[in-house]
Amino acid sequence: MLADNHAGLWTHLVDSLREEINNALRREHFRDASELQRMVLIILDNLNAGNLTVDVARNAILQEVANRLEVMTPWHRILFPAVADRYQGHAMTVRSMMVAPMETGRTQRGTQVTPQLMPACFQ
């Protein structure tokens, strides 16, 4: 069971990353495959725990995934520019899934964020 009402987005993102894992394995880029697998596990673990329903936690998790993708981009910029472009595109997609908080302390979805709802790793 998915923990967010945007299940279609999460499924699409995980499927895209799984496809990139398979592509990396075909190219024998095991470092890429390992890093992409970590990203999938981060997303799935947090979906399972319900952390992605709290906007602050969701943004922190998505920021981590996007940063990991962006770190991988320069590894391939010269020899595999298409791969670098795909990783950069995934990073942009992940960042577009973030929710901007409003100045009142509430998020755009109107959820009040309290520290108790955040996973311990983000406190």
Image (tube, helix red, strand yellow):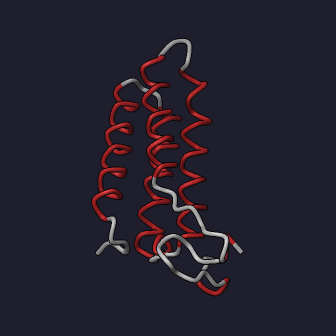
Q: Position of residue 12 (x, y in %)?
A: 30, 51
In the rendering, at what x and y percent does residue 65 appear? 54, 50
Reply above or below: 93 against 25: below
- Residue lying at 42% horizontally and 69% vertically, measured from the top left: 47
Residue lying at the far right in this picture: please name it. Answer: 123
Q: Nearer the viewer, residue 121 or 52?
A: 52
Q: Residue at coordinates 52% horizontally, 80% vertically from top-left?
A: 111
> Is 25 above or below relative to 55?
above
**Side (left or right) of 32 relative to 13:** right
Give the residue at x 50% y 33%.
88
Q: At which x and y percent is residue 28?
A: 42, 26
Q: Quadrant of residue 77?
A: top right
Q: Say above or below: 68 vs 59.
A: above
x 40%, y 31%: residue: 24
Q: What is the x, y in percent for residue 31?
A: 53, 35
Q: Report the side of 6 relative to 101 (left or right).
A: left
- Give the position of the C terminus as an image quadrant: bottom right
Q: Quadrant of residue 5?
A: bottom left
